[in-house]
Amino acid sequence: MIKVVHAGLQSSVQDLGRFGFSKYGIPISGVMDEIAFNVGAAILKNNANAACIETAFGRLQLQFLQPTFICITGADFSPQINNQPIQMHAVVKVDENDLLTFGKRKFGIYTTIHVKGGIQTTKVLGSRSYYQHVTQQNLLQKNDILQIKKQNDQFNFEQSNHVKIDYEKQQLDCYKGPEFYLLNQQQQKELAEMFSISSNCNRMGFVLHEKIHHTATSIISSAVLPGTVQLTPNGTLIILHKDAQTVGGYPRILQLTGDALSILSQKFTNDKIHFNIVDL
Amino acid sequence: MKKQPIQIKSFGDKAILIEWPSTIDKHVFETIVAFKNSLIHDEICDLIIAYNSLTITFFTKVDFTTWEIYLQRKYHQLKTNRSSTPNIWRIPVCFDAEFSIDLEHFAEVKNCTQATIIEMYCATIFTLNFYGFQPGFPYLSNLPKKLATPRKELPQKVLAGSVAIGGEQSGIYPANSLGGWHVLGNTPIKFFNPKSNPPCLIDVGANIQFYSITLPEFQSIKGKIDAETFDFNTLKG
């Protein structure tokens, strides 16, 4: 079992998401940074969809009430076990009563904490991803107890190679969205410029600071997906993420690739990005 | 009735968007529902209907060109003559003062009595177009023009079960939330239950008609639902 000593911010249990229920207004949810998630699952030799704990800004504190193996990927907030620094992207053996805490931010926002065998919470509609009104809780709370699998002492793991993911890159690859054709020349030109991340960001979406030349167009409500870039009537751009509503009435001008969505998830306030339109 | 032509677009590398002419039209919508029901394929993850569109999401990246051809063919083969009228779900709503938060103001704005509003609302046969905004929040169309009202400027606290009007649409809030629609009454019927699969009681494309019940009737139905003794099949017309 794992005990939540301090819940921190936006902490939740997540796997790759809840698929097939957007038709009922249920977002896919799932980890914000899929690249980091897949790396962690591979390092621990977990099932590809084994649930992890995701947290923002490194304020979470967990106590392991039984021995197991963990791996920390995604945002680097100087993870420590019993106040001793541990490596990111590596298998770390934890013993009964060990305490996981975080410290100084080195980069990113969302940290994924993987446990050997995965977090064993109840699946709802095929997924362990927390989401309000679907799972019992939408956030981890202080004193929550999470079940994990019993581990043998032996786990033959290779010392991981140094994992290098280029989160620094400002380029977000994307496709033209269904309403890209509504943009005039001026707007397309502005779309190619640099944008910065505003402070208005969370698991539902990222609002960009700079506006583009606006038009009053709206569309008849239609489906939106994580990665959809919406253009609001006042020219603000919103990049929808994993917990976004499933339907929207704003023009969908771009659609981020899966990897771009993961890179975006680790961008901090005022970080710069630019859209790179690619062909299918 | 002749089928409307469709436009097929890619929507990222794992989804395809099919669009019908840009209006909210009952017959077009029926075609969309029929087409959605005809699409059964292992690679399809989800089929999301909205007013004039159908979005298909896939488990893996798809070859758009191949799928475009396949979808045009399937659409061409689709038979649009309906053999029977869809069932009408009859849903109880309590318009008691306790629940009808905005009814009084609404009647003033519309310059008629509350009773008239309720009568018009309950005479309407709504179509459930899609779920969105929140898990299990249904968007219903066919609202009489007289009842259409822009949503509130500022969202307010809304109780679960609230039956409301926003713009030209009507909807039912599945959970306590903040909402900007005008609340007319409350239904004891639970439309959304994440513990069951499918989690929504009523399918997209179904017809819904509301009828008025008293507060004691509301409490009785609610009691049965909480005790899990209520037979939801009695609601199907």
Image: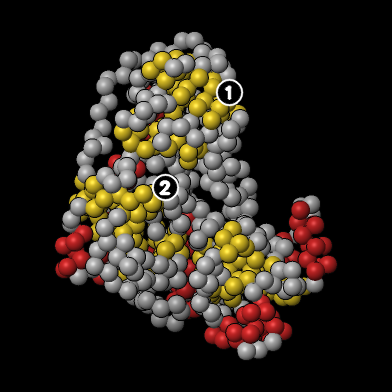
In the displayed orientation, state which residue is furthest to the top.
A153
The image position of residue A194, as x and y in percent, is 20, 52
Above or below for A269 versus A98: below
Judge from the rendering whether residue A34 lies leftward or rightward of residue A161; answer left or right: right
* Residue linked to disc 1: A1
Q: Quadrant of residue B231?
A: bottom right
- Cα distance in 3D space between marks 2 and 1: 28 Å
Say if mark 2 contacts mark 1, CB within 8 Å: no
Above or below for A188 versus B169: above
Judge from the rendering whether residue B158 lies leftward or rightward of residue B74; answer left or right: right
What element does badge 2 sit on? strand
Residue A244 in view? yes
Residue under the point 58% across and 23% down: A1
Q: Which mark is residue A202?
A: 2
Tell me the subunit letter for badge 1: A
* Nearer mark to the viewer, of 2 and 1: 2
Residue under the point 51% across and 16% down: A98
Amino acid marked by disc 2: Asn
Amino acid marked by disc 1: Met
Residue under the point 26% across and 32% down: A165
Residue under the point 75% across and 73% down: B96
Q: Nearer the viewer, residue B134 or B194?
A: B134
What element does badge 1 sit on? loop
Judge from the rendering whether residue B233 lies leftward or rightward of residue A208; answer left or right: right
The image position of residue B122, as x and y in percent, is 67, 79
Quadrant where the image shows the N terminus of chain B = bottom left
